[in-house]
Image (cartoon, rainbow, N blue to C red):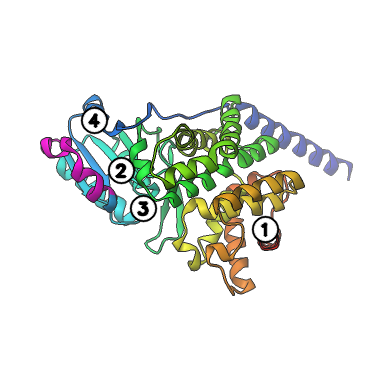
Amino acid sequence: MFHNQFILIKYTINTMQEKQKVTEEKNLIAAFPGKYIQGQNALAELPKLIKLLGKKGLIIASPTAKSKILTKCDFIKSNKDWIITEKFNGECSQKEISRIKGIIAKQNIDVVIGMGGGKVIDTAKVSADMAGLPVIIVPTIASNDAPCSGCAVIYTEEGVVESVYYQKINPQVVLVDTNIIAEAPVRFLVAGMGDALATWFEARSCERAQSGNECGGYSTMTGLALARLCYDTLLQYGPTAKIACENKIVTPALNRIIETNILLSGIGFESSGLAAAHSIHNGLSAIKETHAYYHGEKVSFGVVAGLHLTDALPDEMNTVYSFCEQLGLPTTFAQIDIKNVKKEKLMEAAVKACAPEESIHHEAVRISPDKVFDAMVAADAMGRLRK
């Protein structure tokens, strides 16, 4: 009996030592794009940047970017021999990635450029990474923090989250033309603020629980500080930036929020980590009624649900709800088209949010589908009550 207890104690100590060893060997890691350029008419820099990295570029462009932006670019017309354009087919899926890889090989491309929204950007990043090529990202909307990151979300053809792909390195260049962002529908900018809103809360959760970030290490002070700056800037300049975008003008406030949505949120989430908000977003993707809504819109609902899950202070809860209400970000099921949905369907989303690989397990609370279901229902109830 005593011998068995000794073996158990010895095994426990060895296991604890092994865990401590793993923890000690995990480094502080932060990830950044090679170069970030933001300004009015910044797109004019693209030919020079392509030449800096290679000899022949492939621009994968969203249909809107191809028809409304590239057709007005003189450098496309005058450099057709070394700048090739290709229209994106609409989903960052294995099928579309394979198609782009085929074009890269056939055309002898050595620089890939992704121009458009998040799914175009992710397709360009994954395709370039698989081909071992540098990538330049040109976001035409500030709807999410995909441009600067070294990871991408791959979806099924039906639009359901399938997997996360991690590139070997972050984009070599992120080129942001603020005139283009200002011309885009304001809903994109607001959705980007919904995505950026999660950055601080998820970073804080990872820091509290000593959970890993998206770089395979722990957050640096820099990553955590940028995540906090992201949140503070949203609260200070978000509403004013929305007004600027509604009027299609570039103001200091809009400049700040574009940088917040793309750079601060991008570095903040990747270098400090993800938690409940993005997992709840991924869970909601299992409900087809939500597919018409943007990533950041569903993430904002994930933020308020995450606050209920982690027992946030009432003052903080009020601040976040007020911010979302002022901008028109979803805080209720109805705002993401979940109406008359049976409990079983919501539970299916909760189960998906709690899958073993999900970042919700970075939270410093015990996680279960029942708790996530209750948090989503509580978020919706409070959102409805406040209206």
Query: In the rendered structure, does residue 138 fall within the stretch colored magenta?
Result: no
In the rendered structure, which disc, 1 or 2, sits on the residue that comes first in sequence? 2
What is the spatial separation of the Cα atoms under label 3 and label 1, in whole angstroms?
30 Å
In the rendered structure, which disc, 4 or 2, sits on the residue that comes first in sequence? 4
Q: Residues within 10 Å of mark 2 (few under 14, many from 20)?
A: many
From the top left corner, tell me how far across and down residue 24 is, in percent.
64, 27
- Mark whose residue sits in front, 3 or 4: 4
- Badges 3 and 1: C-beta atoms under 8 Å apart? no
Q: Secondary structure at mark 1?
A: helix
Picture quadrant where residue 46 is located: top left
What is the spatial separation of the Cα atoms under label 4 and label 2, in whole angstroms?
13 Å
What is the spatial separation of the Cα atoms under label 3 and label 2, in whole angstroms?
13 Å
The type of residue carrying mark 1 is: Ala
| Residue at mark 1 | 379
| Residue at mark 4 | 50
Q: Secondary structure at mark 2?
A: strand
The type of residue carrying mark 3 is: Cys
| Residue at mark 3 | 92
Residue furthest to the right: 2
The type of residue carrying mark 4 is: Ile
| Residue at mark 2 | 115
Picture quadrant where residue 171 is located: top left
The answer to whether residue 222 is above or below residue 82 is: above
- Is 356 left, or right, of 385 in this rendering? left
